[in-house]
Amino acid sequence: YRRAEFDERIVKHWILPDLQTQIELGTIGFLPRTVPVEITPDQVTLELLDDEGAPTSELVQAPADFVLLLTGYRHDMTLYERAGIELEGPKRVPCYDPATMETNVPGLYLAGTAAAGERQERYTLFVENSHIHVGRIVQVLTGRWPDKLGTIPARRYDLPTEAIQAN
């Protein structure tokens, strides 16, 4: 995450408390003031940013089985370009197969608002209506549709009830 902390004016109010709880409990890792530099099959290399958000040239390696590229509504298409994803039209929409979410780069998939391009003028893709993208990707990778997808009952956190209710 490029900033030091989440800005509650920007993050959706119904997502932030759960996200903060998961970070505090260690179920979600949080690497603030970083930008991705390289993604390999087993890790992500991140560059640390200073207090003003400028690169420091200090690199951190984070082990990763999978990487979710969460770029928000105004996507920085640099990583897409560096990965070789073709971008089409003035909105720079990534070239991908909507049935599988695989881009023109074999083995590289998109999910969520990333599939809409650099910017959406009429918002059609949101985190809330993009769960199906995950199902399409999982089906390609595993050969079957996931048992549970994008529903509250699908969350299986190993948390005490008090921690969940605190949200």
Image: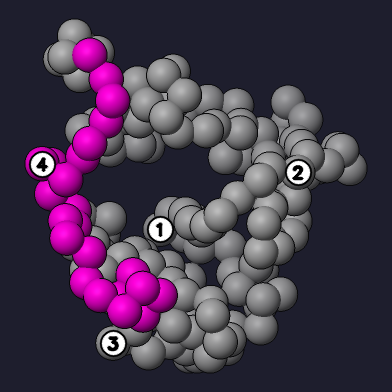
Asked if marks 3 and 2 touch (Cβ < 8 Å), the reply is no
Quarter of the C terminus within the rendering:
top left
Is residue 153 inside the magenta stretch?
Answer: yes
Q: Nearer the viewer, mark 3 or mark 4?
A: 4
Give the amino acid type for the residue marked by disc 3 in the picture.
Ala
Identify the mark nearer the N-term, 1 or 2: 2
Marks 3/4: CA–CA distance: 26 Å
Q: Pointer 3: what residue?
A: 99
Residue 47 vs residue 74, the one in the foreground: 47
Q: Pointer 2: what residue?
A: 61
Q: Nearer the viewer, mark 1 or mark 4?
A: 4
Asked if marks 1 and 4 touch (Cβ < 8 Å), the reply is no
Asked if marks 3 and 4 touch (Cβ < 8 Å), the reply is no
Residue drawn at x 19%, y 9% is 162
The stretch in magenta equals 137-160
- Please give the label number shown on residue 135: none
Q: Nearer the viewer, mark 3 or mark 1?
A: 3
